[in-house]
Image: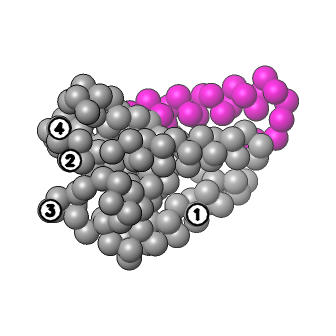
Amino acid sequence: MTPTNVLFLTFLIGFLAGLRALTPIAAIAWGAHLGWLQLRTPLSWLSSIIAAVFFSVLAVGELVTDKLPKTPSRTAPPGFIARILMGALGGTCIAMAGGAGTAFGALMGIVGAVAGTLGGYHARKGLVKALGSPDFVVALIEDVITIGGSFLLVSRF
């Protein structure tokens, strides 16, 4: 895989973290645990079954919480910051696994997370309005895209 392709994937994992902060990290942990991608120290701990289960439980919690009516917007500071941090972590992991520079991978993950957060917010609002459907339905579609996209991306290694 070329460095350019790897860095594009770091942007994409960040973008997916902008949609759901924890799902891409859970997919990375499972991918590393299953040997799909290799993480070195200091991120090798993500390949443990404990990390894979831990992030999966958190990701499921996030998927459920996202559907609750009182959940704050992803653009509110706590959610936005979490997405940026998870985008950076995801980008670092993907860059490491692909043999690219981890600092640039983290930066691309952050850029992707910002794009995913803001783009996902506006796309979800726009689709709810355009389709006249409940937010819940569009949120489920977003879940499928994030889960499927994360595992597809991680399986590329």
Q: Is 97 above or below relative to 122?
A: below
Q: Quadrant of the N terminus?
A: top left
> What type is the residue that disc 3 sits on?
Thr
Q: CA distance from mark 2 to mark 3?
A: 10 Å
Quick one: label 2, few (<14), some, or many (20+) residues within 10 Å?
many
Q: Earlier in the sequence, mark 3 or mark 4?
A: 3
Q: CA distance from mark 1 to mark 2?
A: 26 Å
Q: Which residue, given by chain and number where applicable, does mark 1 sit on?
A: 60
71 lies left or right of 93: right
Q: What's the coloring here?
A: one colour
Question: Mark 2–mark 4 contact, CB under 8 Å?
Answer: yes
15 lies left or right of 129: left
- Is 109 contained in the magenta span? no
Q: Earlier in the sequence, mark 3 or mark 1?
A: 3
137 lies left or right of 93: right
Residue 100 has which mark?
A: 4
Q: Which residue, given by chain and number where applicable, does mark 3 sit on?
A: 41
Residue 96 has which mark?
A: 2
> What type is the residue that disc 1 sits on?
Val
Residue 74 visible in the displayed image? no
Q: Report the magenta residues as a range.
A: 112-135
